[in-house]
Image: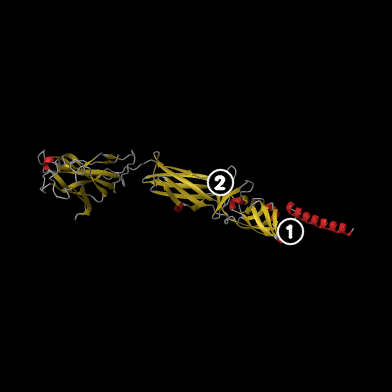
Amino acid sequence: MLLLVLLYLAALTDVHAQTDPSIKVEPEINIRSPYAVWPNYVNKTFEVNVTINDITSEQKLVAADFFLAYNKTLLEVVSVTEGPFFRDTRWNLAGTFFISFVENLPDGSGVIKAMDLIYPNLDTGSYDEWTMFPTGSGTLATITFMAIYQPIAPQSSESCSLGLIDSMFRDFINSEIPHDQVSGEYEVTPLQLPRTPIDIDIDVGTIYFRSEKAEFNILTSDYGKAVDTTSMNAYLYYNGSLFIDLTNEIQHVATGLYRIVYTIPADAEGGTYTLLVEGEFFEAKGTRIRGFLISSTLEGLGASVTEIENNIATVVVPGLDQIKVNLTAVNARVIDVQGTVATLNSTLGVIKVNLTAVNARVIDVQGTVATLNSTLGVIQTDVANLKANVASINGTTATLSTALGDVNAKLGDVQSIATTTLYAASILSALAVVLAATILIFIRKK
């Protein structure tokens, strides 16, 4: 059954002559839910206009007010704004004053009190300069309501009067102008719940590894439209038994879209795991499963680290895209450095990491041992592994050029690198000077 909010006109019993002006509660449109199967109108908003009708300029209307009652269990007032009728520049020469309040009646109903006034000449306090006053029909105020309750089938529709319990029109000399009152009516039909299963789609990876941060995405829909479930559960199974209840890990992302972020335990056994998701949308239910593999090792897959942030490494596995790994959880440690590439050993196996990706830099050289600082921590390796060469010597300080940049070291600490081209050339130059001096002394003796 379609949701239909009907706002219709209900005239009061004391009907005046047809020529009398009136104040009415009237909708701009009949509002229908966009859903054909399960219309839900709760938290939806709609507008109601309070209008002045059939007023003449000769009646010299300059002020109007009204009290409008409504059912607070069905509706909530979002806003009350001034309409354009009194602001028409043909009779709005000095501005308007609009004010509104939302209060409670003794019977628990809500009431909206509003007043609109056309200012007189602010210097004289009169309307003597006015050649025209409000005429015809127009909107005095616009009220925005929000529906806060809707019955559920087989319950009956709910309705309430949008009743004008009092109103007043005043002319330029503060005399009352007789008029009719025409109230409105609000009705909301029951919510018709779907009886067919809702659709649940699960997106998971093909394979995960120990200590990897996995992300599972879930989409729930009904008749092709994304919907938020009224309840959802998620369970991970392994080897025919419940491995972990992931219900509390479900995060709402957008309408009908959810995700679960789960770190694979470091001691998880390798094999096939199954994610089961159950969802309910009122009386409609749905279930879906998806399976994936957990591998205990990266050995032989050519894994390499491209980035490390807060000890979480982004590991690229050829053919398997990227995975996230907590380096502490897998006991990762550096076992070798060659140039700018470090080899990590872990419970997942061997992983390669480019030292530039972990901001590695040489901070000290002692003999043949270089100390590097990085986001992996302090690494020590043989200087030769960094392809170090002596770039220059200044006094007792040598500048070493390495695969990770230049570093200064005391000359005595880099004696083992004396076989480099520049250092060997320096020694040969020194020997040449000594030989030349010896030859010169020999010639003088002759």
- The local crowd at label 2, few if under 14, some if 14 to 19, many if 20 or more residues have their Cα within 10 Å, is some
Label for residue 415? Answer: 1
| Gap in angstroms between the C-alphas marked 1 and 2 | 44 Å
Q: What element carries label 1?
A: helix
Q: Which of 26 and 373 is in front in this view?
A: 373
Q: Can residue 146 be seen in this view?
A: yes
Q: Is residue 186 left or right of residue 364?
A: left
Q: How many labels does the image show?
A: 2
Quarter occupied by residue 4:
top left
Residue 244: x and y in percent read 50, 53
The percent coordinates of residue 179 (x first, y second) are 12, 43
Residue type of the residue flagged with mark 1: Gln
**Residue found 88% across the figure and 59% down from its top:** 445
Give the quadrant of the C terminus.
bottom right
Q: Left or right of 234: which side holds 143? A: left
Q: Position of residue 207 (x, y in %)?
A: 56, 46
Which mark, by number, is residue 445? none
At 44% from the left edge and 47% from the top edge, which residue is drawn?
258
In which quadrant will I find the N terminus? top left
436 vs 22, nearest the viewer = 436
Identified by mark 2, the residue type is Gln
- Across and down, in percent, residue 105 comes to 19, 54
Which mark is first along the chain, 2 or 1?
A: 2
Q: Where is mark 2, residue-wise?
A: 322
Please, what secondary structure does the residue beneath circle 2 have? Answer: strand
